[in-house]
Structures are given as C-alpha cells and as structure tokens.
Amino acid sequence: MPQALALRLHPGEDVRAALANAFAHLQAKQNTTAACVISAVGSLSRAVLRYAGEPEGTLLVEPLELITLSGTLSGDGVHLHASVATAGGEMLGGHVMPGCMVRTTAEIVLAPLPGWVFTREHDARTGFKELVATPVGRT
C-alpha cells in the first residue's frame, strides 16, 4: 500500500527541486505515477512566484512565511502554487518557480495517488503543458 512521504527541507534548499526529487523517490520505491501536496508549513528566504497572467516570475528576497503550498506531481514535472506572508503580514501568492529557497525549515507531506497516472501534455488553448489525469487501466 503506498504511503505518504513526510519531508523536512533544510535552509538553502529549493522547494520545487526538492519536491521533484521526492517524487522521483516515490516513483522508484512505490511505483507512484501521481501525487499531491497535502500539507506544508515553513519559511523562505526568497521566493519566485509567477502571478496570474504574467509571463515571468517575480523575485521576493525577504523573510517569508510559507502559508500554503498545493500542487500535483508527476514524472513530467511538478505544478505548484504557494501563498507566502511577508514580515508585515502582507499575503502574496502565485505559481512556484525555481528559486524558492528555504529559510529555516519547510515541512511538507506528499500523498501518492494510487489508481492514477498524471502526465502533462501541451494544450493548444493555453499554450502550456497541462495535467492529464487518467485512472489506471485507461492510459
């Protein structure tokens, strides 16, 4: 039976890269083809978030609290969104780009999704590689 994977990321680790590596571990050890983030708390020293409708990410370099992190993970990559709070309590959120670095800790729990295969395929309507979620046995 597939089991959740609990991670503690350390200062200086890139959140996106660490989750891609964690998914690769789930693939190898549990034959997982789909997973999601079910819990995340921590802090970042910098974040790169792409806001809705923007072509590039925005760099934030300051102490940030990781308030939420959600997303899907597959062999084709990770798709993550986060909300962060500044030291003054301002909330910001968007698509997680490479370069979101842990400040003190990030505690993240991933859940494998048995019975599903997640892939990403180019969608002509959006111009992006989008999620294709297929129940196992219907690939």
Image (cartoon, helix red, strand yellow):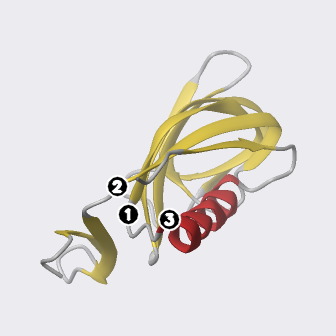
Residue 126 position (above or below residue 86): below
115 lies left or right of 7: left
Residue 92 position (above or below residue 133): above
Residue named by callout 1: 34
Amino acid type for the residue under numbered disc 1: Ala
* Callout 2–callout 1 Cβ contact below 8 Å: yes
Amino acid type for the residue under numbered disc 3: Gln
- SS for callout 1: loop
Q: Residues within 10 Å of mark 2 (few under 14, many from 20)?
A: some
Residue 80 versus residue 35: which sits nearer the camera? 35
Picture quarter containing residue 134?
bottom left
Q: Residues within 10 Å of mark 1 (few under 14, many from 20)?
A: many
Q: Is residue 119 visible?
A: yes
User: Which one is closest to the eye, mark 2 or mark 3?
Assistant: 3
Residue named by callout 3: 30
94 lies left or right of 61: left
Residue named by callout 2: 113
Amino acid type for the residue under numbered disc 2: Leu
User: Residue visible at 17% across and 77% down?
Assistant: 125
**Along the polypeptide, which appears first: circle 2 or circle 1?**
1
Q: Residues within 10 Å of mark 3 (few under 14, many from 20)?
A: some
14 lies left or right of 97: right
User: Which one is closest to the eye, mark 1 or mark 3?
Assistant: 3
Q: Quadrant of the C terminus?
A: bottom left
Rounded to the nearest whole Å, what is the CA distance between mark 2 and mark 1? Answer: 5 Å
